[in-house]
Image (cartoon, rainbow, N blue to C red):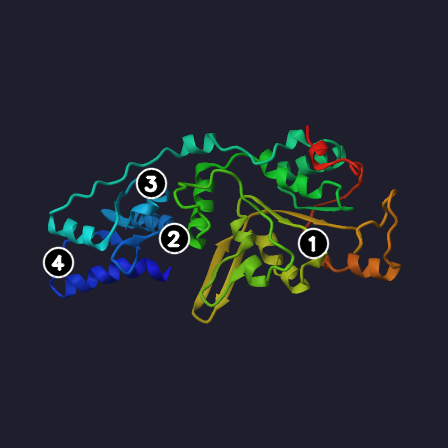
């Protein structure tokens, strides 16, 4: 968030040195400055504009490139500017900066489309039924099956059968993406439920957040959406154990010497794994090459407290083996 204060610091210096008149009462200024005085895209603009609204400021000045995300906030005037020079001319009265027009959130959300169509998945009727139950009741689900049984496709299609984001939910999600820099430049708001699929080599900080200057992790980026953890037993044990609090409380609290930060983390967990290291234990068509002791240790990698927080456990048959990926969808 540090670069966002470039603009107000520069403005404060100009006012303190008497170079411009202090006509900035009840106004907020945010933006990262480039070396030539231009304003660059800045992370976290959306929550800053909301702060201006909540504190009853007259208006807020932001980089013009951030205008789309800021325009979803109503009840406060947003002034997009391109450079420090433009702001100086505005305070001198030689340039007018029109406020941005708010956009209609309801229209944006109605046009949202799912990336994958759940109804087009062929086969795995039992697994699809389990997914529908998970979506209806917001139940965490754990799928076990051999490679090619459709675990990833089922997980990716799950957001498409979840209810559409409400306006408040969309704003919650977009604030997180704005802070972390994951909101695409030019996009106003996140319109679809998030789907996050971190690799099993992801660190604890990457999964739940943290760092010297704490920032949200994957569990917060999956807020109001789906967190898909493929190769579930391959995640380091201490990384999986860090999921206990967000799975129980729907938030993640990060404590540092400077203070404590709490981020939202209300996600639907979809875990997936092979039944053994080689992937074919119990498969009727391909023999498993793993020793019994190796299979037992592999299946015990996930602790009881984590498994207890997962409501639905299903095994997938490999009915689709021999078909190409295009034959698993209608």
- Provide the residue designation for mark 2: 44
| Alpha carbon separation for disc pair 2 and 4 | 28 Å
- Residue in the image at 59% along x and 62% along y: 203
Could you tell which of marks 4 and 1 lies nearer the N-terminus?
Answer: 4
Task: Please give the label number shown on residue 71.
Answer: 3
| Alpha carbon separation for disc pair 3 and 4 | 28 Å
| Alpha carbon separation for disc pair 2 and 1 | 32 Å
| Alpha carbon separation for disc pair 1 and 3 | 40 Å
Q: Are marks 2 and 3 in contact (CB under 8 Å)?
A: no
Query: How many residues crowd mark 4 within 10 Å: few (<14), some (14–19), many (20+)?
Result: some
In which quadrant of the rendered image does the C terminus lie? Answer: top right
> Which SS class for mark 1?
helix
In which quadrant of the rendered image does the N terminus lie? Answer: bottom left
Query: How many residues crowd mark 2 within 10 Å: few (<14), some (14–19), many (20+)?
Result: many
Task: Please give the label number shown on residue 72.
Answer: none
The percent position of residue 28, horizontal first and vertical second, equals 25, 53
| Alpha carbon separation for disc pair 4 and 1 | 59 Å
Question: Is 13 located above or below residue 140 in the figure?
Answer: below
- Provide the residue designation for mark 1: 232
Task: Please give the label number shown on residue 20.
Answer: 4
Query: How many residues crowd mark 3 within 10 Å: few (<14), some (14–19), many (20+)?
Result: many
- Residue in the image at 61% along x and 61% along y: 242
| Alpha carbon separation for disc pair 2 and 3 | 14 Å
- Residue in the image at 88% along x and 49% along y: 287
Q: Are marks 2 and 1 in contact (CB under 8 Å)?
A: no
């Amino acid at each position: 968030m540090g670069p966002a204060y470039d603009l107000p610091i520069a403005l404060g210096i100009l006012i303190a040195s008497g170079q411009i008149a202090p006509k900035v009462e009840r106004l907020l200024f945010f933006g990262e400055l480039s070396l030539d005085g231009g304003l660059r895209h800045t992370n976290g603009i959306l929550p800053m504009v909301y702060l201006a609204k909540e504190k009853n400021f007259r208006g807020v000045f932001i980089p013009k490139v951030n205008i789309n995300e800021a325009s979803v906030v109503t009840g406060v005037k947003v002034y997009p500017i391109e450079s420090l020079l433009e702001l100086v001319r505005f305070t001198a009265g030689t340039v007018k900066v029109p406020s941005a027009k708010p956009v209609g959130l309801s229209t944006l959300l109605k046009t949202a489309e799912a990336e994958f169509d759940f109804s087009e998945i062929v086969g795995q009727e039992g697994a699809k039924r389990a997914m529908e139950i998970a979506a209806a009741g917001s139940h965490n689900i754990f799928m076990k099956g051999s490679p090619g049984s459709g675990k990833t496709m089922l997980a990716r299609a799950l957001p498409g059968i979840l209810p559409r984001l409400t306006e408040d939910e969309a704003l919650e999600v977009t604030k997180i993406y704005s802070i972390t820099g994951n909101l695409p430049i030019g996009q106003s708001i996140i319109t679809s439920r998030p789907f996050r699929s971190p690799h099993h080599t992801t660190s604890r900080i990457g999964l739940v957040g943290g760092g010297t200057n704490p920032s949200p992790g994957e569990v917060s980026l999956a807020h109001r959406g789906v967190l898909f953890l493929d190769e579930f037993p391959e995640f380091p044990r201490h990384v999986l154990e860090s999921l206990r609090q967000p799975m129980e409380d729907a938030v993640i609290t990060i404590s540092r010497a400077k203070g404590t930060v709490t981020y939202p983390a209300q996600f639907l967990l979809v875990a997936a794994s092979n039944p053994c290291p080689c992937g074919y234990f119990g498969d009727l068509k391909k023999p498993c090459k793993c020793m019994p002791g190796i299979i037992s240790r592999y299946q015990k990698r996930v602790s009881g407290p984590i498994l207890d927080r997962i409501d639905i456990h299903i095994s997938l048959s490999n009915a689709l083996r021999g078909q190409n990926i295009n034959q698993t969808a209608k």
